[in-house]
Image (cartoon, rainbow, N blue to C red):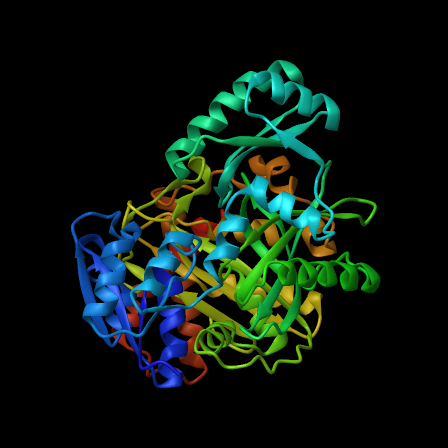
Amino acid sequence: MFKKVLVANRGEIAVRVMRTLRELGVASVAVYTDADRASLHVRYADEAVALGADPRAYLDAERLVSTAKQCGADALHPGYGFLSENPDFAELAETRGVTFVGPPPSAIRAMGSKQRARAAMAAAGVPIVPGGGAGTLEEAKATAARVGYPVMVKATDGGGGKGMRLCAREEELASALERTRSEAEKAFGSGDVYIEKALVEPRHVEVQVLGDRDGNLVHLFERDCSLQRRHQKIVEETPCPVLDAATRDALCGVAVRGARSLGYHSAGTFEFLLDRSGSFYFLEMNTRLQVEHPVTELVTGTDLVREMLCVAAGEPLTLEPSARGVAIEARLCAEDPARGFVPSPGTIERLVTAAGPGVRVDSGVYEGASVSPHYDPLLAKLSVWAPTRERALARLLRALGECTVVGIATNLAFLERLLATPEVAAGAYDTGFVERHAAELSAPLADANDDAFVAAAAVSAHLDAAHGRANGRAGASAENDALAPWVAVERAERLGR
């Protein structure tokens, strides 16, 4: 095993990786920009190295690898996002004698282009969504006519929900091409796009794979990621509530076949679209750890970060995965749903997170922390496990209800409303569900500045405190008593009551 690992990332995923390193007795090294100087991942690490004032320094491959060498790290873990799927970064690390904790650069490169990935998977016998080239408007029109409208115009080097446009008819195609190319150029440095058939009300189901350097490959079952907003995942669960055993076996088997065709090792995820008939089609492969990996860890009892580190260190894979129960994750973000989900940077004045049986919180913040406008607004991931889906949903709603964030806007109320809908309770949703119900899910909440509203919340908090004292909790601190009305106001405001 390694002696020291540099974590080339920030936020909750950096803390997540460092926790496993600590359990393994491996020293961790954090990197940070000026904006992240007081961040949780910097505080948690055994060592921390400053990258300077530029908030984009997490994308400086040369700087990151040089830092790893200078501090004596024998490996680096890229987390997700930033350079995690950059084959040049992986190659640079390896050529400098720093082990890249991830798949081989050849696999990253093959799957980094959506067009190359589609071709490679088709050759491996993996079903793909019908589509084709869109190098020119004429080619795009021909492809769209062949596969049939509606179509998706997608960035060849895209990801993370960016660089894609739905196009319902030919009259919209020129504008969709122009806008997608522009967004792709800004986000990924390439304006290349292609076209895929847009499936009607599909589900987004992905399969976690894991392999070692000796060619041993396993799957760790599937995750349903269909609850999305603008192609960004919001809530994920496993198992998929509508997948039958035969389709699950076929889906997972195809993912392993695709990974084997790439000579893949480490953790990776095959993403599929599942249509109403139960047919599934390859969408893309993420050659890294997924944001939603905690739900897989909860149902399989596997530490995926640990497995990635062991594989990178040359150890054989000995897993025989099995799954038990249901796990669901919700992403808590610093954004304002009532204002179109605009980011909400600022200082977290008050923070209370959930606890209790079957609850896991992966967080990158703390009370008093500053949320930077320069980075993704993800604050924490709240995941739960229970024996059944009904109990898991109830547990997640309970856990969300325990959370309080004061000082910045968050999507807490949005998540509670979403998970309380009858459709989600029944598992009867698809990738368009959130957009179709956006108005009611994102409706403005009660005005916390209204005098009557504040007074009512304060009275409620006072009664709660009195009830607590009557039940033998008179030892509560004066500080907590003083904060209770503030917290009550925030939570009542969030729920709009």
Q: Is residue 465 left or right of residue 384?
A: left
Decide if residue 102 is in sight here.
yes
Find residue 425 and report its image quarter: bottom right
Residue 212, how many percent across, how many down? Answer: 55, 73
Identify which residue is drawn at 44% across, 40% down: 341
275 to the left or right of 44? right
Identify the image quadrant of the N terminus.
bottom left
Which residue is drawn at the image coordinates 31% and 61% (left, top)?
350
In percent of width and height, residue 157 lies at 49, 40
Give coordinates of residue 307: x percent, y percent: 51, 76
Percent position of residue 492, x then y:
45, 53
Look at 69% across and 77% down and name the residue there: 322
Q: Splitting the image into 4 quarters, where does residue 475 fall?
A: bottom left
Toward which corner of the image does residue 32 lie, by quadrant? bottom left
Q: Nearer the viewer, residue 252 or 486?
A: 252
Q: Is residue 408 above or below residue 360?
A: above
Camera-nearest residue between 223 and 450: 223
When the figure is inspected, residue 121 is found, relative to residue 10, above or below; the finding is above
Residue lying farthest front? Answer: 95
